[in-house]
Amino acid sequence: MKRDVIERVLWSLSIDRFSKVKFKENPNKFLMRFALEDADIEKILSFDVKALQEMGVNPMLTMGYWVEMSPDKSMRTYNQKLGSDGVHSASIKG
Amino acid sequence: MANIVSGFLVPHDPIMFVAPDAPEKNIADKAWGAYETCAARLADLDVDTVIIIGNDHYMLFGTTCLPQYCIATGDVDGPLDQLPGLKRQSIPNNEELATFIAAHGHANGFDWAVARSFTTDHSFSIPFQKIVQRASELKGKEIQAIPVYLASAVDPYLSMERSQQLGLAISRAVNAFEGNNKVAVIGSGGISHWVGTKESGKVNEVFDRKVIEYCLSLNEAAIMSLSDEQILAEGGNGAMELRNFVCTMASVQADTSELIEYQPVPEWVTGLGFIELKKN
């Protein structure tokens, strides 16, 4: 199931130090290890957390991988990418 | 015979540690003060063991194995997700009682997953450090803690019915244990909060107060009557942790209850409820 392999990738990128290092070194090469379609690879590489959640990926994983691996890491940007209207972002300072 | 003498329902909000100054000071003080109140009451109860019922946040259990319910029977440390003021440390587990609960379950229709070594996350370690460890300090006596993790945040979720049955099974196991242990149970979770979704930061006070009323009236059935769809819509994905409350309430079988504190805190993205479950 497509969602399952993406969750496997995002869990690795949230938790596993070796995976994080390899992804940073060469993200495309790292993702080739998994049975991903090109469109899914693009979603992961572009940190398209909205599209990933729409596929059923657990939001805790999209958040974890965002915080650990995205160039930005800002939760404000994360919420913007999800399409948040910003109404419920009182805790976000950065 | 060992005995469960009390219970608490408390939140495990990591944002409290990451952004302690985000809410107004009087609100923050009430929330932190509620943990201290729980700790003082736990110390007064003179328990030797606390079972903390929490849930993984998709960091401890990966995609290769997602247990419906798990008990740590051996070496425990944590949390994995260290926070400011919540450092990773060794945790004194009551290995003998935890092993007995697992074995008793296996003999009576509850196929526990067991962790012979276990690293907690914040759902265990916040109530452990803020309540159990603090009570140990106040009492001057070590209180051991057993981690129990339910599938409350990662699907497939443990059903509400099974959560209740598991709580009752824990109670029966403790009562069957040959020891004089006094045990408390802490249900760690919610109430309303949205984790990693675009609604994050929303708090639904109406939903929270409904859940609190159900807890105070010791009405597990009312909580169990909430469908997953209703919980997700009204309380967010974080409120699926109500399973932890149901399991705890079933294990304690309290006679009375008391609301220690409730604060809806959007700055901390959660409706924070603190309830004591009391036995006569």
Image (spheres, coloured by chain):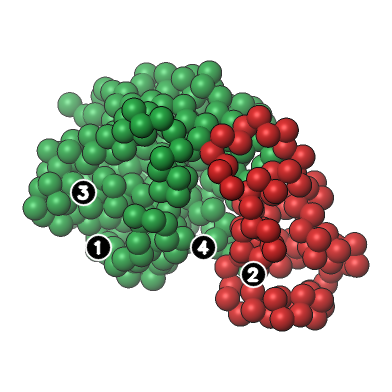
Distance between mark 3 and mark 4 Cα atoms: 25 Å
Q: Chain of mark 2?
A: A
- C-beta proximity under 8 Å, tags 3 and 2: no
Residue A77 in the image: x percent, y percent? 70, 48
The colour with which the image depicts chain B is green
Q: Nearer the viewer, mark 3 or mark 1?
A: 3
Residue at image x 50%, y 35%?
A: B267
Distance between mark 1 and mark 2 Cα atoms: 29 Å
The colour with which the image depicts chain A is red
Position of A83 relative to B154 (above/below): above
Residue at the extreme front of the image, as rendered: A94
Which residue is disc 1 drawn over? Answer: B92
Q: Where residue B60 is drawn, which disc sits there?
A: 4
Q: Secondary structure at mark 3?
A: helix
**Three-letter amino acid code of the residue under disc 3:** Arg
Q: Chain of mark 1?
A: B
Distance between mark 3 and mark 1 Cα atoms: 14 Å
**Three-letter amino acid code of the residue under disc 2:** Ser
Which residue is disc 2 drawn over? Answer: A12
